[in-house]
Image (spheres, rainbow, N blue to C red):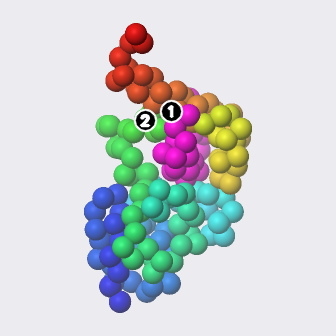
């Protein structure tokens, strides 16, 4: 069975077992290795990607559920040479310790900021709590999400021009 899934703006015709988890397709078939295998149970968030703008655990998402839907991975946000705003904020705050959870953290943060551009600290904490960091950089991660939100606000204000 061939399924068509749009990943980072590119349609991919995939001939895989429909029950294959999205994470395996990303890593094994498409060589998109940003999302990591953590627990395989949807409890750690290392595998987080976006599906139609919502953060999901790719280890639990069968590829058959994605036919015709849009998937965005950390590779779709930017590159090493041109990182996206959330990636730059995580780098500026040095939010990565071992780095294993960071792609999932960034994707969850991006999903929040896409829906809520100026979240409160309580909203950031509530949204990010499903992703775990075993290194304990939670405060840096929270600062990175705040920094990304603040820089987006600053960019929007700059585009609007000075107040009259």
Visible in this render: residue 90?
no
The residue shown at (65%, 66%) is 42
Q: Is residue 161 left or right of residue 74?
A: left
The percent coordinates of residue 23 (x first, y second) are 49, 68
The residue shown at (68%, 34%) is 121
Q: Are marks 2 and 1 in contact (CB under 8 Å)?
A: yes
Q: Which structural element holds mark 2?
A: helix
The percent coordinates of residue 74 (x first, y second) are 43, 51
The percent coordinates of residue 126 (x first, y second) are 70, 46
The residue shown at (39%, 77%) is 67
Local crowd size for mark 1, using a 10 Å CA cut-off: few (<14), some (14–19), many (≥20): many
Q: Nearer the viewer, residue 142 or 136?
A: 142
What's drawn in magenta, residue-wise? 93-118
Q: Is residue 68 left or right of residue 108?
A: left
What label sits on residue 85 in the rendered view? Answer: 2
Visible in this render: residue 17?
yes
What label sits on residue 36 in the rendered view? Answer: none
Q: Is residue 92 left or right of residue 1?
A: right
Q: Nearer the viewer, residue 26 or 145?
A: 145
Query: Is residue 38 located in the magenta-colored stretch of the structure?
Result: no
Q: Which residue is mark 1?
A: 148
């Amino acid at each position: 069975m061939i399924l068509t899934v749009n990943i980072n703006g590119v349609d991919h015709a995939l001939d895989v077992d429909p029950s294959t988890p999205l994470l395996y397709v990303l890593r094994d078939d498409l060589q998109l290795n940003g999302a990591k295998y953590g627990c395989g149970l949807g409890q750690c968030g290392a595998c987080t990607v976006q599906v139609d703008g919502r953060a999901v655990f790719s280890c639990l998402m069968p590829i058959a559920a994605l036919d015709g839907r849009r998937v965005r991975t950390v590779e779709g946000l930017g590159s090493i040479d041109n990182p996206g705003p959330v990636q730059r904020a995580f780098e500026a705050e040095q939010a990565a310790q071992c780095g294993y959870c960071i792609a999932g953290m960034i994707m969850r943060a991006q999903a929040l900021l896409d829906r809520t551009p100026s979240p409160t600290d309580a909203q950031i904490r509530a949204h990010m709590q499903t992703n775990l960091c075993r290194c304990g950089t939670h405060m840096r991660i929270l600062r990175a999400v705040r920094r990304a939100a603040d820089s987006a606000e600053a960019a929007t204000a700059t585009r609007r021009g000075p107040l009259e």
